[in-house]
Amino acid sequence: MTEKELQHLVESISEEFFGLAFRHKAFFNTRLKTTGGRYLLRSHNLEFNKKHYDQFGIEELVGIIKHELCHYHLHLQKKGYKHQDKDFKELLKEVGGSRYCQVVPGQRRIEAFKYFYECRECKTKYRRKRRMDTSRYVCGKCRGKLIQVY
């Protein structure tokens, strides 16, 4: 699928499902790794992850387009456009957009925690990527002393 075809697809979905015109740019962004698409607040453009289209096909892409168009139209109407907003959830359900996109194999990074700490008092465990000075920091729950497990 070319950028021109994507632009036409987004415009047609906007007209059909939302009854509103899409007057900005839609394009593929090859740098997107962990998301299917993105609505840019300042420019009002939409970016999409081409790997989702290549891997899962047109149906997955249409679901992502509907999701991003929900952000787009709600933001321009000055309504709740964020994921947790009631307006967003209702519109997404109404148009049949996808709440979450599928994971492209090999795209998500696995979090590598090197350091593990435990509270002496309440036994709460903390995982950290970076080392922590246990003489400066205490447990967030009970303010007990932290010890490095490994």
Image: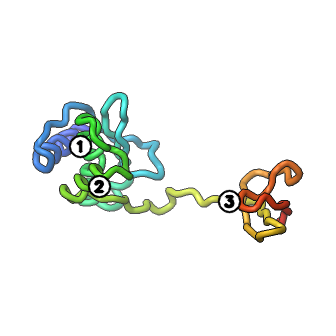
Q: Secondary structure at mark 1?
A: helix
Residue that appears at 22% across and 52% down: 91
Return the residue at label 1. 6
Return the residue at label 3. 112
Furthest-front residue in view?
A: 142
Left or right: 140, with 121 as reference point: left
Amino acid marked by disc 3: Ala
Earlier-in-chain disc, 2 versus 1: 1
Left or right: 110, with 126 as reference point: left
Q: Measure how far apart labels 3 and 1 are at the Cα level.
A: 36 Å
Res 1 visible: no
**Which callout, 2 or 1, points to the residue nearer the camera?**
2
Please name whichever residue, 100 or 106, is drawn nearer the observer in this view of the structure.
100
Residue 81 occupies quadrant: top left
Residue 129 image offset from top left, x and y in percent: 72, 54
Q: Secondary structure at mark 3?
A: loop
Residue 68 image offset from top left, x and y in percent: 30, 46
Residue 23 occupies quadrant: top left
Return the residue at label 2. 89
Instruction: Give above or below for 132 relative to 28.
Output: below
Amino acid marked by disc 1: Leu
Residue that appears at 37% across and 35% down: 40
CA neighbours of label 1 inside 10 A, class few (<14), some (14 to 19), many (20+): some
